Amino acid sequence: APLELRVKERGLCAADKDKPCYRGSAAARGCPMFEFPMSMDRNNYCNLCAECVKGCGRDNLVLRLRAFGKDVWASGRRLLDESCLAVVLVGLTLLVTAAMLTAWPGWISSLARWLPAWVRAGLKPVTYLGLVESVVLLGGALVLVPLLVLAGAALADRLAGGSGLGLRRTFVVFGYMFIPVGLAMHLAHNLAHLLLEGGGIVPAVQRAVALYTPFSLGQPDWELLPLAPEPVVGLLQIAVVIGFFVLSLVAGQRLSLRMYPDPRTASRALVPMAALALVFTVAGIVLLNQPMGMRHGM
């Protein structure tokens, strides 16, 4: 988010023994997310409810603009579960996009032929095909992509030499730079749905109003054209993916410089992770340029 709620002066917070912004007072309930404003440096768990603002008697909180995506590189708090989630989402967005391609059913059928004959004979095709598809989706997102990033982290730690952070810490730190990569695929994929299928909301609303209310907005016996031609949508998708890839590199560079005192060491450690971000980005562009089988019957 381009907004952040932060303290103006930490000294004032340190001098206040009651901490009503966090613990609550007669004027406010305290933070429902258990975030302490004095140490808060990211928006992950702040929902901007402003209870801390109401509770602060020193007027020491301010809502201000900040760079989009700043949490990716600016926060000092790095957690393994958040980093794993960021990496898994890259795999999920890639595979969910692949699952909507016209070629996907053929790929799943080809993989299903590797199942033993007794398995296919004992189950309905829809059952064993669904099982194969689930294994591909979950295995790719939860196993393959995280293992690739883990291998990249091992190489990055090796390239860092004596300044290395260790495998676990390297994975945790650099995992955050893949957030823009996964977000790019999600936005680019749904951008096509919005621009190519978004016009369908008008006849859908007409039908809903006619069916569930005593009013009428006319008979929906027509269809809207796409909001943008397919070539334009394709260019916009690529622009989104490339733009967020650049943001991923910026985040990776700032994370690396933050963790390694020597800029040359930071650059060496970043190379494997930047290469992986490029691989995932190229894979996303390739998938977005394949024939898409729309689920919603356009």
Image (tube, helix red, strand yellow):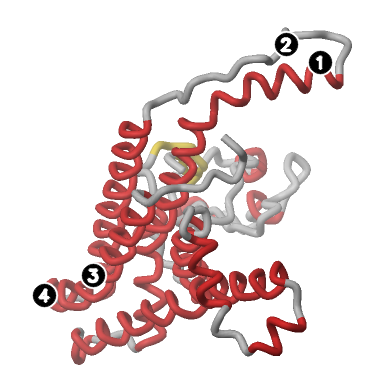
Inter-mark Cα distance, 4 to 2? 67 Å
Q: Secondary structure at mark 2?
A: loop
| Residue 104 % position (x, y) | 50, 61
Q: Secondary structure at mark 4?
A: helix
Circle 1 Cα neighbour tier, 10 Å, few/some/many (<14 / 14–19 / ≥20): some
**Cβ–Cβ under 8 Å for marks 2 and 1:** yes
**Cβ–Cβ under 8 Å for marks 1 and 3:** no
Which of pointers 2 and 3 lies earlier in the amino acid sequence? 2
> Amino acid type of disc 1?
Ala
Q: Which mark is residue 264?
A: 4
The label nearer to you, 4 versus 2, is 2
> Amino acid type of disc 3?
Ala
The label nearer to you, 1 versus 3, is 1
Inter-mark Cα distance, 2 to 3? 54 Å
**Cβ–Cβ under 8 Å for marks 1 and 4:** no
Which of pointers 1 and 4 lies earlier in the amino acid sequence? 1
Q: Residue at x 63, y 19 (%)?
A: 202
Q: Which mark is residue 210?
A: 1
Label 2 belongs to which residue? 219
In this picture, is 226 found above or below 49?
Answer: above
Label 3 belongs to which residue? 275
**Cβ–Cβ under 8 Å for marks 4 and 3:** no
Q: Residue at x 50, y 43 (%)?
A: 5
The label nearer to you, 2 versus 3, is 2
| Residue 184 % position (x, y) | 39, 50
In this picture, is 153 found above or below 202?
Answer: below
